[in-house]
Image: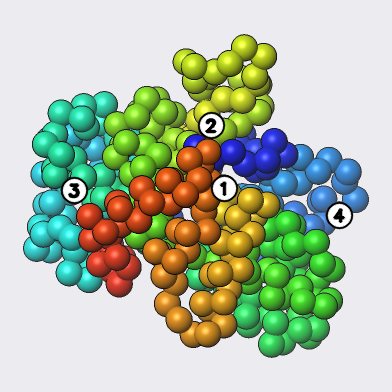
Amino acid sequence: MARPEPDGERPTTVPLFPPVAVGMAAVMAAALAWWQFYSGSGERAEKEEVIKDLLEEERPALLQVSAEGSRELLEVLRGHADDGVWPPSGQVAPVTVERFPDDLDTLHVDERKEAFLRVLTPIVLAENQRIEAKRQFIQEVAHAFPELDDDQRHRLEALAERYRVDVPVGEGDFFRRLLRRVDEVPPALALAQAANESGWGTSRFTREANNLFGEWTWIEGEGLVPEDRPDGERYAVRIFPSLERSVRSYYYNLNVGHAYREFRLERERMRREGKPLDATVLATNLTAYSERGEDYVSELLAIIRVNNLVDISGAVLVERR
């Protein structure tokens, strides 16, 4: 179970953006408005909430479907695929659901896994696209620095604060540190961790809280209390409004959490050497994700291997028609 620091990302308490791409002009205007409003404010908590919403851009639109139960959901998802075959042959339909049906465990194990992967793969691919757009922006302004306009500088500063880069903007190895944190997670690894932590979508925390990765919160009243929580403990399992939000929080946790520094350094080495992000190698750097340590890593590697999740690494999210 993931245990982000108590001062980690606070669950959002502001209205969420709709699942559509936000125009760059609107984003820049929001950035300028944010800066003007908060430049003289000492309310850090409120500022962080605005930063989170400010950086919601570049989000591929996913079609949210619904179904009466898991059997119907599987048929709906298959109907949106060009060939109906899983795993995909390279292209993934941008179709998902906000939450899993409660009866997911009634499907045969192979069908349950198929439904789970059909729901989550588009979300993971969309999240990687969103992060890649941020990386492209960072790389572009790094080449242009310090000749940036106000909108570029404000957005860069918002990214630096969001991803907790403690080097002044543009100084020293600022851009390297920011790119180390603003980066993708191989689909095979994200899917394997989600499957492991959520029991392929059937756990209580996933059904009742949309929590795929076992993330905790220490904010009173904003989590689901585990039935076996020891007396005196304050932690709870975070509640997310959707599966997409759970995936996004997982990415953020890996990208900023102190416990995952080695994971980020290994990913950075792969980037520097021009190698693709290897899910199996990166998984070995996640012993701190669970109390099970090396056994947890072994479980992830087995899930990746047995379910051929590496095959999904080359998949791309097709545009909605």
Q: Is residue 216 visible?
A: yes
The image position of residue 293, as x and y in percent, is 50, 45
Task: Indicate which label's residue lies in the foreground, 1 or 2.
Answer: 1
Does residue 105 appear to the left or right of 146 in the view shown? Answer: left
Q: Which residue is mark 2?
A: 238
Are circles 4 and 1 on residues that touch, CB within 8 Å? no
User: Which residue is under mark 4?
Assistant: 39
Eye-nearest disc, 4 or 1? 1
Kindly state the secondary structure of the residue where label 2 is placed: strand
Neighbours of disc 2 within 10 Å: few (<14), some (14-19), many (20+): many
Disc 2 + disc 4, Cβ < 8 Å: no
- Location of mark 1 (residue): 288
In the picture, measured across the screen, residue 297 lies left or right of residue 286, that is left
- Kindly report which numbered mark, 2 or 4, lies closer to the viewer in this rendering: 2
| Amino acid residing under circle 3 | Glu
Q: Residue at x 54, y 70 (%)?
A: 267
Where is residue 303? Give x, y as percent.
30, 51
Residue under label 3 = 114
Residue 105 located left or right of residue 140: left
Query: What residue lies at 58% left-to-right and 16% top-to-bottom?
Result: 230
Residue sitting nearer the eye, 70 or 35: 70
Question: 295 or 181, which lies in front?
Answer: 295
| Looking at the image, residue 116 lies above or below residue 270 | above
Q: Mark 1 or 2 closer to N-term?
A: 2
